[in-house]
Image (cartoon, helix red, strand yellow):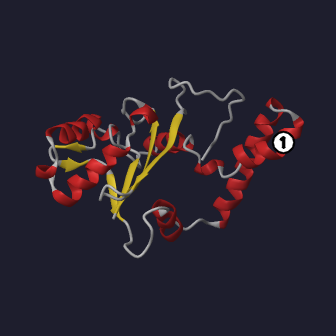
Amino acid sequence: ITYIFDKKQTQDQNDPYWACGYMTRNGTGSGYDFESVSVDCRFSARNGGWQDNLDIDHEYLVKFIKEGKDKLSVEEYKRLCDKGYIFDDKLQVLTAKADAEKSIYGSLMRLCEEKIPISEEMKKFSKELDESYFQAIKDHYPKHMAKTVRAYMCTDRIASGVMIPRVTEKLLEANVLKPLTDIQKRAVFSILFYS
């Protein structure tokens, strides 16, 4: 993985490495417990960003999964279709049933810790990446803020949302991934855990 540091970090959606995320949502109490995470970047085609990433969207999805489309109101079903979360009565969002023995919260973190081994080489690369990023940005902040900048902005950069468009780009170039269809782009980089 090659990571290029831009000295000027922007929130410009025209930047090919811009990402909005991780947009997390969770809910309980409605009878539809869930935890979700989404990331927007140039490979996704959602509208509205975090402002339109509503808890009710995920409640409707869980309702659709558990009870079927006939239990959704016309407005609920339309919302899921408009968001691209369902198409032709099929889920377009990656979903996982959470472990009933554990809290729904933290499901994604537990899944990653249990299923994704991290090699010593990757851990070393991650530390080098964090240090390189710190060196690239530290002069943009007052010296007395160095520890805070390092802790808040330069820890686990490899897990940052901005890595998603970079890694996706490389996987597409290597033909490991195929370009997404217009339908897939509306729900890509979205994961829903439900109980």
Q: Name the side, left or right, on which 137 lies relative to 163.
A: right
User: Alpha-carbon neighbours of circle 1 within 10 Å: few (<14), some, or many (≥20)?
Assistant: some
Percent x, y for residue 32? 31, 57
Of residues 72 and 6, which is closer to you in this image?
Answer: 72
Residue pushed farthest front?
A: 29
Q: Name the side, left or right, on which 11 lies relative to 139.
A: left
Vertically, is 21 above or below 65? above
Residue visible at 30% across and 41% down in the picture: 184
Of residues 136 and 142, which is closer to you in this image?
Answer: 142
Residue visible at 26% across and 38% down in the picture: 183
Percent x, y for residue 118? 59, 65
Of residues 32 and 126, which is closer to you in this image?
Answer: 32
Q: Quadrant of residue 99?
A: bottom left
Give the total of numbered labels: 1
- Image quarter where the C terminus lies is bottom left
Of residues 177 and 38, which is closer to you in this image?
Answer: 38
Query: Quick one: SS at disc 1?
Result: helix
Type of the residue with mark 1: Ala
Vertically, is 171 above or below 182? below
Residue pushed farthest bottom?
A: 101
Residue visible at 80% across and 30% down in the picture: 140
Q: Name the side, left or right, on which 140 lies relative to 156.
A: right
Percent x, y for residue 175? 41, 45
Percent x, y for residue 120? 67, 66
Residue pushed farthest left?
A: 70
Q: Name the side, left or right, on which 173 lies relative to 66.
A: right
Pointer 1 residue: 146
